[in-house]
Amino acid sequence: MSRPVIAITMGDPAGVGPEIVVRTFADETVHRVARCLVYGDARVIDKAARDGKLGLTVRAIDNPAEARFAGASIEVVDLANADPASFEPGKVQASCGKAAWEYMEAAVNAALSGEVEVLNTAPINKESIQAAGVSHIGHTEMLASLTGTRDPLTMFETLGLRVFFLSRHASLRQACDLVTKARLLDYIERCHQALARLGLGGGELAVAGLNPHCGEHGLFGDEEVREVEPAISEARTRGFRVAGPIGADSVFHQAKIGRYAAVLALYHDQGHIATKTLDFERTISLTLGLPFLRTSVDHGTAFDIAWQGKASAVSMVESILVSARYAPAYRQAQRPR
């Protein structure tokens, strides 16, 4: 299979996005598995490359068809919307939030039109996005709106551990209320579909417990008895391979050693803590259920170290490698049957 064409959005110009993007292009392993281009501002990328003394040539292009994917170069679909002299590194700025949104919008349109195969995103800052008046709080919400996708799935992967999330950006109180039989049934089905689309079909999905020790049959919390167990039982009758609920203090380890294909975490931090503790830099976020594959680093704009030459590109390099590994199966799943 040919190397997939991956569009990398530059993220918030004031954050570490530009730095980790240029360092990713300096990594030869990336070029061996993928053809990458950037959606951003060529002036910002050029400054980041020069600051890093990476010896890379930056070339502004108008669309992916113009890309040559030559070595020692970075090709940028140039939106020219973030003059480096116009923003302050490491600060929340509406102009940077607006620019980050525009990179996303343009890259998603390219993916929808088939000009690129995979979307990989550098970090955005939620405060900057809100200051710009963008109505979507984060990448997942942006992707859902731009593609018309209902409630896309988020999956984290690191060192063989895969974790889905029943809810994302909700308070813990709201997240508990979202643990319902109907929602769990829907997610169990869609998690299996997503795994199959990645070429990982046939494995068993584990559902994490919500309460300590899964509530001990209702002694301290009855969500497992009322909602989780009935959902799992019905899912099994529908033919899905699913286990649980399994205590959250052990289920992630069991999945890491291969007992389960993936875990369905019941709220945001339950899964984030497990994956990021295992390997923070190599935890990769995948958004599934879209018309195209999307991967991302799982860290923020790191304003405290932005533009200081301290940001590591390990996570972005890993996210490109993950993209390239799953792209063939995702491509095959997209083809009409």
Image: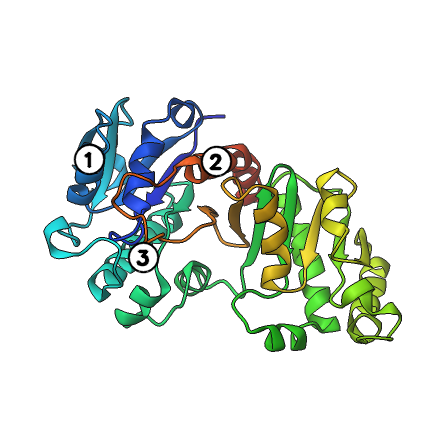
**What residue is disc 3 on?**
105
Image height check: is 33 above or below 299? above
Task: Check the image and name the residue furthest to the left.
Answer: 85
Q: Secondary structure at mark 1?
A: helix
Residue type marked 3: Glu
Q: Secondary structure at mark 2?
A: helix
Of 305 and 179, nearer the camera is: 305
Could you tell me which residue is drawn at 52 percent across and 48 percent down? 286
**Distance of label 1 from label 2 (alpha carbons):** 23 Å
Residue 318, labelled with which disc?
2
Image height check: is 46 above or below 275? above
Residue type marked 1: Asp
Of 205 and 5, nearer the camera is: 205
Few, some or many C-alpha atoms within 10 Å of disc 2 (few <14, some 14-19, many ≥20)? many
Of 154 and 48, nearer the camera is: 48
**What residue is disc 1 on?**
51
**Distance of label 2 from label 3 (alpha carbons):** 24 Å
Of 294 and 84, nearer the camera is: 84
> Is there any visible trace of residue 337 in the rendered image?
no
> Is there any visible trace of residue 300 in the rendered image?
yes
> Hey, which quadrant is residue 209 in on the image?
bottom right
